Amino acid sequence: MFDSNVAMWLLLGSFVVFILCRMPVIFAIAVSSCITMFYMGTPLMSFVQQMAKGVDSFSLMAIPFFILAGEIMGAGGISDRLLKAADAIVGRFRGGFSYVNVLGSMFFGHLSGSAVADVSSLGSIEIPMMVKGGYDRDFSVAVTVATSCQGVLIPPSHNMIIYSVAAGGASVGALFMAGLVPGVTLGILMLVLCAVISIIRHYPKGDNISFKEAFKVVSSAVLALFTAVIILVGVTAGLFTATESAAIACIYAFIISVFVYKELKISMMPKLLMNTVKTLAMVFSLIAAANAFGWLLAFLRVPTLITQGLMAISSNKIVLLLLINLMLLLLGCVMDMAPLILIVTPILIPVITALGMSKVQFGVMLIFNLAVGLCTPPVGSALFVGCSVGKISIEKTVKAMLPFYAVMLLGLMLVTFVPEISLFLPRMLGFAV
């Protein structure tokens, strides 16, 4: 026999120690799980079985297609067209380049579903453009990094699919729709903040272009944006599943990039496929290891103990939700998004269920929290990439991002305490939330 308390602390303690020693998250999860199972006397074959069970899901088949579609669109000149479309819409106003940055992230981020992809691809264009146009470098990098969070919320987002699996099968379509309004709301808040800062710092206005030129530029970007229309309309109308929509969007992006825009060469496809495989190897390995880790957490009753512990602190729903948000924000500062989704979801689902919160609303709240973590030190991957692209220190960027952090926290509080912001659209479209 084994002591369940010892096993629980061995599992969690060894995991934390490995993370602090900078062991890759996948190995930290796997090794801590194996050590605990060895102590418990559980056959290690059970670990392998749980890993296999973790990736044996039809919903996960959508992820490779979404990733490949993002790779194709990134190499097919789509990001450049989306930036030009945003510039045609808002570039003429004071601080116009910052508005272009926000809208560019809204347009491209929802296509890639990745904050890091947004910063690395658009940032290399936007940051030099803003600095050359008379904007402070720290502000240029800060707005690029902060607005990348929108791409994680606005559908389609492969992180929503990962959450759906971790939450025990929450509707992917409902999650996609639930993230749309919060993502757009965050974008609007960012636009307002950029307007205020631009007025205070007297940033320049952009060039005026004729309506004919603007219409031509925007029309060129419509075909790129239609990728999202295929996914959203197809899923919400029940024409096909999220996986089928991802496959169709992938084919559509390939046709547009190769035969319409003619910027993607067939010879580039092996490299794009290799990049996709590399990303998939990390994502699926992480999902597999995290499923075994989650199985151990459930077996040792960790979710139940955490639920009881939080309920013992306070019975007030507002206090508990604030505590959960604070915990997720702190965790997001030291770990990446995907492993955190897989680890904390099965732990916190019983808590939010006891509080009467929908799994769909919690999914948006969770993703929002962890998106903020992508922009915060010490492990904010989007922050690091932005500073690298913008050639500026992290300290200066973090200081410039303080107003953006405040805006993101405001959006997070709205999502947490106003359920209809995330649930209105799924309900209107007939999804069970």
Image (tube, rainbow, N blue to C red):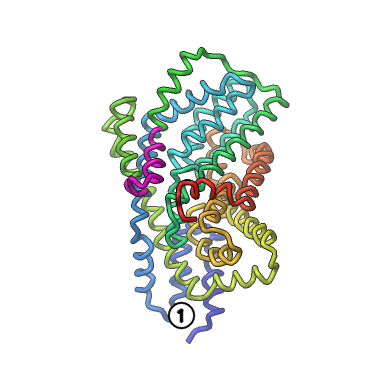
Residue 235 lies in the magenta-colored region? yes
* Label total for image: 1
Span highlighted in magenta in the image: 226-244
User: Would you say the magenta stretch is mainly helix, strand or loop?
Assistant: helix
Looking at the image, the residue that sits furthest to the left is 266
Question: Which residue shows up at 56% across the image and 64% down it?
Answer: 353
To which residue does mark 1 refer?
A: 40
Question: Which residue shows up at 35% across the image and 73% down it?
Answer: 45
Looking at the image, the residue that sits furthest to the bottom is 1
Residue 168 lies in the magenta-colored region? no
Q: Position of residue 233 (x, y in %)?
A: 39, 40
Q: Position of residue 29 (x, y in %)?
A: 47, 64
Q: Position of residue 195 (x, y in %)?
A: 66, 28
Q: Establish if 150 lies above or below 132.
A: below
Classify mark 1: residues with Cα within 10 Å, few (<14), some (14-19) or many (20+). some
Question: Which residue shows up at 33% across the image and 56% down it?
Answer: 58
Q: Position of residue 300 (x, y in %)?
A: 51, 76
Residue 16: image quadrant is: bottom right
Q: Establish if 134 lies above or below 182.
A: above
In front: 210, or 328?
210
Residue 266: image quadrant is: top left
Q: Establish if 226 lies above or below 412.
A: above
> Can residue 28 be seen?
yes
Q: Establish if 390 lies above or below 417.
A: above
> Can residue 387 be seen?
no
Tell me: 416 left or right of 225: right
Residue type indicated by callout 1: Met
Mark 1 element type: helix
